[in-house]
Amino acid sequence: MAKHKTKNEPFALTKYSPDQLKEALRKMHLIRKFEEGAEDSYTRGLIHGTMHLSIGQECSAVGSCMPLADDDQITSTHRGHGHCVAKGAEVARMFAEFFGKETGYCKGRGGSMHIADVEKGNLGANGIVAGGIPIAVGAALTSKRLNTGKVVLCFFGDGANNEGAFHESLNMASVWKLPVVFVCENNKYGMSTSIERSTAVENISDRAAGYSMPGVTVDGNDFNAITEAIDTAVERARAGEGPSLVESLTYRWRGHSKSDRNRYRTKDEISDWMSKDPIVRFTSFLVEHSVLTEDEAQAIEADVEAEIAAGIEFAKTSPDPLITDVSRDVYTEALS
Amino acid sequence: MNAPVNTADLETVEMSYSEAIKDAMDIALGSDERVILMGEDIGVYGGAFQVTGDLVHKYGEERVMDTPISELGGAGVAVGAALTGLRPIFEFQFSDFATLAMEQIVNQAAKVRYMLGGEVSVPVVMRFPAGSGTGAAAQHSQSLEAWLAHVPGLKVIQPSTPHDVKGMLLQALEDPDPVMIFEHKLLYKTKGMVPQGYYTVPIGKAEVRREGTDVTIVATSIMVHKSLAAAEELQKAGISAEVIDLRTIRPIDPETVLASVEKTSRLVCVYEGVKTLGIGAEISAMVAESHAFDFLDAPILRLGGSDNPIPYNPELEKASVPQVDGIVASVADLVKGKI
């Protein structure tokens, strides 16, 4: 007998198959363990530069990408590893990029801050706060103009909501009714400055009213809440009704970047959020609703660990770029 | 890609520089669905300098798009559209307003391809009405082309004639990378013979506008015309000046410049942008670092914009950028060994 969906049933159970939900859990683990692996490799001196970890925000990334079709597109941020995995990237090529190798997604030219996977529709992370927002609107313009049916999902953080590019972009997307979904992952701090000290409105989603588009604030660590909000926004975009702004409340467990000494927030605050681990929360939800068993959940985690280990090995053994290729790809056709 | 066209086979017609730009955009809009125009007041208003004119009536508001007064966002939308399959031509109302959009031009358009390991291209064309001489003072008269020419990943051109601006704009649309076109506002009404229909003029190739034997003048944009006028005067004084129209400032064409300096043994650079750290410094260094250095019989001379914002008073405004009389006097002094 087909399962009857009642009105009170959680959104994700009405919308996604058990296999899709298990895959969502797998991706959350993959993001967590990818970043732990990257952090460990950084500490051991295998990765240089810096990185911005999203540990604690996995549900927001995966949940936001759930309603997207394969050929829909995203733009991402400096805290973009989770978005990249959520949109379907292989962790081996991501590790290779972090290790600066020719086999990386950006052939070792971009690193953590510019990770992209164009084939899977990830147009790239961005080192400039709000830099990707107008680009997402441009991609949505292409979709509308060429009638491709693609929806563009634009990730940015709370810090971006005070950049001019944010305001200009939301306005244009609304004036032109473009198929774009703005997803503000509000993790409470733009580097060290809290939203209370930087942002005049109580909710960043309140900004949507200024641009005549729907704006909602949801718990981004609640898989049902984030998928339902994004699904509504994606459907609206796909129907030609224009953009939406979804504020996804979440929290990064780690500092802003590797230089952060956490002087602007308390240990209690961090440990409180860590006690509400979104992956544990999602796992409990799935077990509670008999989507999988505890054993199956552990098996998923173990599989991911093996994938991470293999990915790091792939990165370590991949070739470095040739020094003589340093100017390659500045232009599409090499200048004479 | 359109096949190369031999312009000798095309009928020519006299048109102004701005009409030539519009003609190029008309051809592009008519032949390629991916081409769109974006900018402030380029629709029914026709553009601040009437370059887009009535194109909106021919192609509609969806392809000739008035943007809000949002230079950063608008330029970024053009970059994102180019990244994903359109061929936008983005008009800055005045080149000065590019300062509001430097993030998208410098951090995004110029670098996305490289940062992503060559996985994407950004075939965006941006147009910048530039230069002084209109009495618009300091924030509407600048020549900022050297700023953008400093950025790897961009191509920067300064066509000086109606023929070139049409052909180079059409070439820019063939180019897979971002091309920045600086159009001197005083050139818009200048006229010249322009081939009808489709043709291209290469990016990265300078042109010898006048042959000479005593001195090489390398000029850009409107300074090509001022240098040609100066060369006429110098001829009367028995000085034979060769005038090179650089046309592209990134990538620069070294061959044409070096061959000319080898022939004349003297080099003068004339450009409207601020002289200090400008295009002339690059040309001078290029010659100094090359085999052509051995051929020099005189110091290299740069004539560029003075180190001040463009003033409102017309005499002060003229005094801030090279003029024909000044070019004549400086070149004559150089050739006579007074410098």
Image (tube, coloured by chain):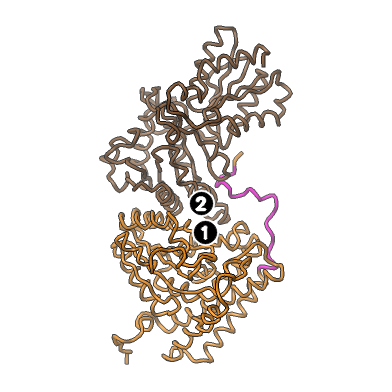
Chain colours: A orange, B brown
Disc 1, SS = loop
**In this view of the protein, can residue B6 be seen by the observer?**
no
Q: What element carries label 2?
A: helix
* Residue at which label 1 appears: A126
Q: Nearer the viewer, residue A37 or B88?
A: A37
Residue B325 screen position, x and y as percent: 52, 15
- Residue sitting farthest toward the front: A197
Chain that bears disc 1: A
| Residue A260: quadrant of the picture | bottom right
Q: What stretch is highlighted in magenta?
A: A315-334
Is residue B57 a member of the stretch shown in magenta? no
Quadrant, the N terminus of chain A: bottom left
Q: Is residue B198 left or right of residue B238?
A: left
Residue in view at x 49 percent, y 44 percent: B178
State if disc 1 and disc 2 touch (CB < 8 Å): yes
Q: What residue type is labelled 2?
A: Gln
Secondary structure mainly formed by the magenta segment: loop
Location of the C terminus of chain A (image quadrant):
top right
Q: Residue, x 39% and y 80% (percent of image)?
A: A224
Q: Which mark is residue B74?
A: none
B185 vs A68: above or below = above
Q: Mark 2 lies on which chain?
A: B
Is disc 2 surrounded by few (<14), some (14 to 19) or many (20+) residues within 10 Å?
many
Same chain for labels 2 and 1? Say yes or no.
no
Q: Position of residue A223 (x, y in %)?
A: 42, 79
At which x and y percent is residue A94?
59, 67
Q: Is residue A333 magenta?
A: yes
Rendered image: mark on residue B108? 2
Residue kind at label 1, given as amino acid type: Asn
In this view, the residue in front, B316 or A185, is B316
Residue placed at 39% from the left, 72% from the top?
Answer: A67
